[in-house]
Amino acid sequence: MVITNKEKAARSWTTRLEAKKERIESVKSLVDGVIIPTDRIVDALELLIKPGDRVVLEGNNQKQASFLSQALVQVNPKKVYDLHMIMSSISRPEHLDIFEEGIARKIDFSYAGPQSLRIAHMIEDGRIELGDLHTYIELYGRLFIDLIPSVALVAADKADRNGNLYTGPNTEETPTLVEAAAFRDGIVIAQVNEIVDELPRVDIPSSWVDFIVVADKPYELEPLFTRDPRHITDIQILQAMMVIRGIYEKHGVKSLNHGIGFNTAAIELLLPTYAESLGLKGKICTNWVLNPHPTLIPAIESGWVESVHCFGGELGMEQYVAARRDIFFTGKDGSLRSNRTLAQLAGQYAVDLFIGSTLQMDALGNSSTVTKGRVAGYGGAPNMGHDPGGRRHSTEAWYNLMTSDDPLARGKKLVVQVAETFQEANKPVFVESLDAISVKDQAKLAIAPVMIYGEDVTHVVTEEGIAYLYKSDSISERREMIASIAGVTPIGMEHNPKTAERLRQQGLVALPEDLGIRRSDAKRSLLAAKNIDELVQWSGGLYTPPAKFRSW
């Protein structure tokens, strides 16, 4: 078939641009240049957003475009409806209220921790059409392929009157969301805390932004990565000792990502004490990708840490980060420059180790945080919790996991899962079948929402010991290794004591005593800081914790 010149001339190649111009023209009577008056935001959204639009709403782990999300739920559902929402994190009630009100119909997301129970019920009741559960990088990538947004609603700290944005310590995912819309003729609206004459630095240029609106109050920030050392248990300290001795020291782990949790907080607080006593400073844990965890302060202050690249900021850590420029990535203004997309990529390809925890694990090491009645999603864990086939650079830790003499053999990234054998309410973590399988059918997903596949897990750590799964030769041996450290869970009750002893002798499983660790030594006295106040002292008063963490 040959397309004639007449047909070519008849086609418009600027339909998206023309549609954008129409939308912008529709609000001219409302706006002052690029500024939408605070009290007219709902009116503006009703004109700028069309039925069926894909709308990306900033709501990641910490920073929420809370003013815009609250405005969106107030639009007239007769004017704005059937929206396809794209969100990293479903964190606020109005994120789901827009579905209850008939404003939105479909959702693609990564994480829904605070709203995990509610979204599970809404999916079951048919009030939400679920697209897919994504990892962060996967969702960001699709914004440039088949989930290109019509509208992006984001948050920034400050703007100037031209629309340049300053995001400050919490840049996070904002540049990625804005770019996906701005360069495909979508509408970009940014809520800001204030408009100033001169910005400390420009994080997003005005040419990417269509409108700004001053929020009625600052955007919401959650201190998601703050863990009070008071709540770290002796069991978590024991597990931390095993990780340091049986994994970090054994494999020479220098670059790493710590997931959020008390077990990894315990590791951070044992570096200046227990790990120091082993003579490991400079040999492990030097280069990090993680949010500025307050529990990392003692390790930074005692010379353990060389660099930290951050997904986002952390409330109360702003002054401390600005004062430690040699460690963190900061701008000329002294504030942190975080980037969730780049940090996810670094966590996937550039680090030796990812360590995190899970709610359920089956007999082969498959794990998920999606359980019956709770669709939490999994955020970035699958990005970082797998062995990336595209990696080509070698480090001691990566090379250390090579188990073949084949001349084309390659190393492997360390993927560690730490779990106590039972959760709260005496629920076993180790189960025969993941709840994710039944959730798949309930939510009409194509595949079960597994967080980390067993084939990628190299080590499992419980209060019983460590299973070195990367050494296993068969599925049956992998099952035996996990069972031997699964305690009195249904999986653990399968283990044969004679088999477990053989696994220990072969170095496939290690109990604390095999690592030279006495269980009785796992006490809170080992922690470099035992409460938030001591973290403040370690920081020289630079760390200013949120009020809910202050006990003085």
Image (cartoon, rainbow, N blue to C red):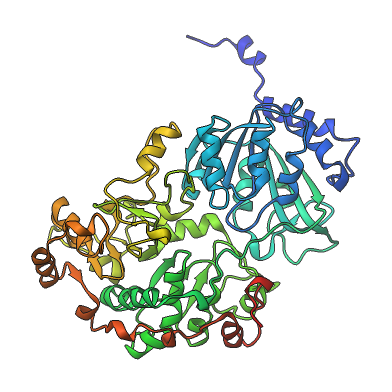
Q: Residue 542: where, in percent of width, then height?
A: 65, 82
* Of residues 544 and 547, the one drawn nearer to the viewer in this rendering: 547
- Is residue 445 something one can see in this rendering? no
Front-most of residues 177 and 184 = 177
Identify which residue is drawn at 57% across, 56% down.
Answer: 61
* 151 up-or-down from 265: above or below: above
* Quadrant (top left/top right/bottom left/bottom right) for the C terminus: bottom right
Q: On the rendered structure, is 277 left or right of 514?
A: right
Q: Is residue 111 above or below residue 551?
A: above
- Residue 387: quarter of image: bottom left
Q: How many marks?
A: 0
Residue 449 x %, y %: 40, 43
Against 132, is 113 above or below? below
Q: Nearer the viewer, residue 407 or 525?
A: 525
Q: Position of residue 386 (x, y in %)?
A: 34, 54
Residue 370 lies left or right of residue 541; in this view the side is left
Task: Using the rendered view, name the quadrant where residue 397 is placed.
Answer: bottom left
Q: Position of residue 325 (x, y in %)?
A: 60, 78
- Residue at 43%, 31% (x, y): give it: 444
Residue nearest the observer in this picture, 157 or 162: 157
Q: Residue at x 53, y 71 (%)?
A: 227
Residue 67 showing in the rendered view: yes
